[in-house]
Image (cartoon, helix red, strand yellow):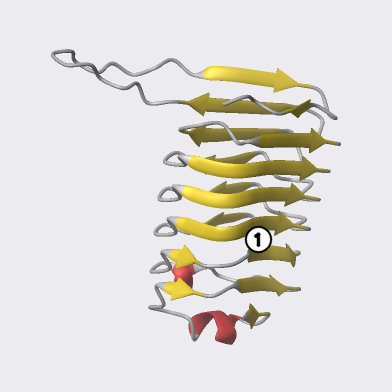
Amino acid sequence: MRATRQAELDALAGCRVLPALTVRGAGALDLAPLASLTAVDGDLVLGPTTAWSSGELPALARVGGTLRVSGNAALGTLFLPALTEAGALELVGNVALVSISAPRLAHLGRLAGRGNGALALLLLGAPPASLTLEGSPTVQLEVVSAPTPTAGSTPSPAPPAPAQGPAGTTHSPSR
């Protein structure tokens, strides 16, 4: 499924699950009609666009394939508050992108990025199986794992484990 005009996005209002979705266009597209979207079974592609400055998909919990955010010249922030699982996250050519937040993310197969702004990522849960970031001035990645409580103990928040590196950093954490 492809949406290149606002009317096509508006027609998706109330949809909870889609097989795949590509959203791209030359003008400002409002993602509000996708507020009920909880899952995309295949790939979700956002971009290229020229007019998004921020985006939010408040109910999106699962992307079975790749979540690709690509070529969004003005996109500064992307907020995915319900996202818990994605096969991959690709961030390519989003020169203004400084923040992508997925505070509930527990499973990410691969994270790749190239040519983005001074990017700060916040991921909650296990780190991605594979990580490749290149061509961004700076990248700050925080993986915050929730502790596993033991019998009779009170869980306490785990401190963030920051990983910062220059452009071209590649990291494949072991599990």
Q: Name the residue rendered at 70%, 50% in the picture.
A: 90
Q: Is residue 82 left or right of residue 155?
A: right
Q: Nearer the viewer, residue 33 or 22?
A: 22
With respect to residue 124, does 84 lie above or below? below
Q: Nearer the viewer, residue 70 or 86?
A: 86
Amino acid beneath label 1: Trp
Furthest residue to the front?
Answer: 175
With respect to residue 111, does 12 lie above or below? below
Badge 1 crowding class, 10 Å Cα cut-off, few under 14, some 14 to 19, many 20 or more, is many
Q: Residue 102: horizontal and vertical position, in percent? A: 49, 43
- The quarter holding residue 110 reads top right
Per the image, the residue denoted by label 1 is 52
Q: Name the residue rendered at 62%, 56% in the picture.
A: 67
* Quarter in which the N terminus is drawn: bottom right
Q: Residue 120: horizontal and vertical position, in percent? A: 63, 32
- The quarter holding residue 131 reads top right
Q: Residue 94: horizontal and vertical position, in percent? A: 76, 50
Q: Is residue 38 left or right of residue 69?
A: left
Q: Name the residue rendered at 71%, 64% in the picture.
A: 47
Q: Residue 106: horizontal and vertical position, in percent? A: 45, 39
